[in-house]
């Protein structure tokens, strides 16, 4: 699935079901062209940590309207993790992504071809008010 963050378009993998527990564990570091999207059924407290992830990550927490609520930095092998209250989505990106592409809190993310993934990884049509 392709998404646009600011002026940057990237390919994301949806981490739904059991993939939510693995994330980037045992994988190679992503490039600036890719990321991993975690989808939750409802806005909730979301905590991400990185056991068995040998590289740092930028983490973007989004609300249900796809607006960035918070940007966090997740260290490699971090057992404490990072968290956000009332997040509907979390996006893991290569460390330095947000700085390089000037991504800031309040930026809205757009999905292409205008779909929002559900927590079961079956895309739902994007509601017109989100555009």
Image: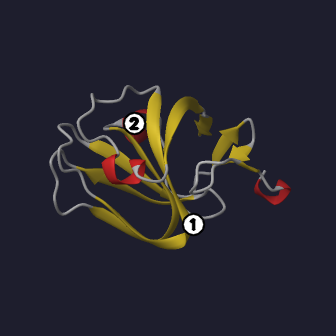
Q: Between residue 9 and residue 39, name the one nearer to us.
A: 39
Q: Position of residue 12 (x, y in %)?
A: 51, 36
Q: Residue furthest right?
A: 128
Within 10 Å of disc 1 (Cα), the crowding (few <14, some 14-19, many 20+) is few
Q: Position of residue 27 (x, y in %)?
A: 27, 32
Tell whether label 1 touches label 2 (CB within 8 Å): no
Judged from the image, the secondary structure of the residue bearing numbered disc 1 is strand
Q: Position of residue 113 (x, y in %)?
A: 74, 35
Within 10 Å of disc 2 (Cα), the crowding (few <14, some 14-19, many 20+) is some
Residue 48 to residue 114: above or below: below
- Asked where in the image residue 65 lies, by quadrant, the reply is bottom right
- For the N terminus, the quadrant is top right
Q: Position of residue 7 (x, y in %)?
A: 60, 33
Q: Residue furthest front?
A: 18
The number of numbered badges drawn on the structure is: 2
Judged left or right of residue 31, residue 74 is left
Residue 31 to residue 115: above or below: above
Judged left or right of residue 59, residue 4 is right
Which residue is depicted at the point 23% across and 50% down?
Answer: 50
Judged left or right of residue 108, residue 57 is left
* Sequence-first disc among 2 and 1: 1
> Which residue does the numbered mark 2 point to in the structure image?
97
Q: Between residue 61 and residue 100, name the one nearer to us.
A: 61
Q: CA distance from mark 2 to mark 1?
A: 26 Å
What label sits on residue 60 in the rendered view? none
What label sits on residue 41 in the rendered view? 1
Which residue is depicted at the point 49% across and 37% down?
Answer: 13
Name the front one of labels 2 and 1.
1
Judged from the image, the secondary structure of the residue bearing numbered disc 2 is helix
Which residue is depicted at the point 35% across and 45% down?
Answer: 23
- Asked where in the image residue 63 lies, by quadrant, the reply is bottom right
């Amino acid at each position: 699935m392709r998404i646009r963050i600011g002026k940057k378009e990237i390919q994301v993998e949806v981490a739904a079901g059991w993939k939510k527990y693995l994330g980037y564990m045992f994988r190679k570091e992503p490039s600036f062209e890719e990321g991993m999207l975690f989808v939750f059924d409802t806005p909730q407290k979301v905590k991400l940590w990185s056991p068995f992830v040998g590289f740092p990550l930028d983490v973007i927490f989004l609300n249900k309207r796809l607006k960035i609520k918070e940007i966090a930095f997740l260290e490699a092998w971090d057992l404490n993790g990072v968290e956000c209250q009332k997040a509907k989505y979390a996006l893991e990106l290569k460390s330095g992504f947000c700085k390089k592409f000037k991504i800031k809190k309040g930026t809205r993310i757009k999905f292409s071809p205008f779909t929002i993934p559900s927590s079961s990884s079956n895309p739902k049509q994007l509601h017109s008010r989100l555009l």
